Amino acid sequence: MPHAYTDPSGLSRYGWTGALDQAFIEHHEAGLVPARISRVDRGRCTAITSSGPVRATFTAPHPPDPLLTPCTGDWAALRPGAEPHLAALLPRHSAIVRSSASKSSHGQVLAANVDTVVIALSLAAPLDAAKLERLLALAWESGARPVIVLTKADLATDPESVHTEAAALAPGVDILVTSVATGHNIDALAALLHGTTVLLGPSGAGKSTIANALLGEELLATGTVRAQDGKGRHTTVRRELVPLPGGGVLIDTPGLRGISLHDAADGLEQVFAEIEDLAADCRFGDCAHDTEPGCAVQAAIEAGELPERRLRSYRKLQRENAWAASRTDARLRDERANRQKAITSHLRATYRFRDQQP
């Protein structure tokens, strides 16, 4: 009979496992201690250690790359002392990545080592199908399991019709209609969560309210929404990780105004699986699903089996993802060219110096 895992790190409450123990052996021998990053701000991070939270410094990657920068949910090797310092990050088993809001082509990691992505959408406003598809692509691409939570059922006139609409966009995904005001399905949601859960969704969706209900206390700030459009203010201003009373941890995130995809081809295939399946029956392998003869996708639209809006959304997100990929490729080419220029310049300077020697 196998022995139960004992946690020498004291971090099992935050998701530490035997596999992480093995990955940490080299760092342990170097005198470092394990920690999980709960928050990053002002060039520092809050890291949870076996002796409690500490504020630690970290060295930003050079050249700067947000994908390599510590983020909420990361497991790290910490050098303890009067000025704790983050020495290394452990490999991530999953990461939620969107295109950076900056002009660079880097991706931005919203949360790392996530097991469940809760996509929160308010029933107090009409369902935005395109936004749901984007969030689903983000979630599927991360490697985590998505769960859709339709919040504020107490403010909705027909929540079940919205549930049906969401189910058509996300076959196989668990969808819950919830209300914190009445407590409807909050226990059911808690039962679906395991490991590390992250809350994603637009401002005003009620993410922090849902989080507080799951936590059993008012730990996270909440706010009101504008009556005219149902949009909320950013009451959550940074990503933060907190333990759940029933086990596992929760990461609340600021409302997402922009949800640009970054290298999400696999996520798009999952979200639009029915189009991918239909495309396999097209006459031509490179069918654009437009006016080509023998197009199974267009045949499904004409038969009323596939909404045309769905194909438009698929094309739009594919173009956006391809554009993001091309920007990344261009940046990598420029970085390689700059490195080559630097090497060439150094060699020329060396040769000039040698030529000047007597």
Image (cartoon, grey):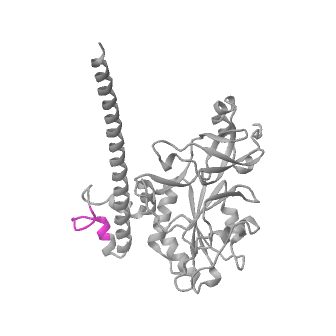
> Where is residue 313, by image quadrant?
bottom left
> x and y percent of residue 149 in the render?
60, 70
Q: Quadrant of the C terminus?
A: top left
Q: Is residue 103 left or right of residue 60?
A: left
Magenta-colored segment: predominant secondary structure: loop
Q: Is residue 76 left or right of residue 164?
A: right
Q: Residue at x 57, y 45 (%)?
A: 92
Please state the horizontal and vertical placement of residue 55, each as a whole percent of the image: 69, 49
Q: Residue at x 44, y 62 (%)?
A: 260
Q: Quadrant of the N terminus?
A: top right
* Residue 322 lies in the magenta-colored region: no
Whether residue 348 is visible = yes
Q: Residue at 36%, 61% (x, y): give it.
A: 320
Could you say which is closer to the camera, residue 218 or residue 264?
218
Looking at the image, is 202 positioned above or below residue 69?
Answer: below
Residue 205 image position (x, y, % from top left) = 58, 73
Q: Percent position (x, y) of residue 270?
A: 45, 59
Residue at (68% x, 73% y) in the render: 185
- Magenta part of the protein: which range? 288-299
Q: Quadrant of residue 32?
A: top right
Q: Nearer the viewer, residue 332 or 351?
A: 351
Can residue 305 be seen here? The reply is no
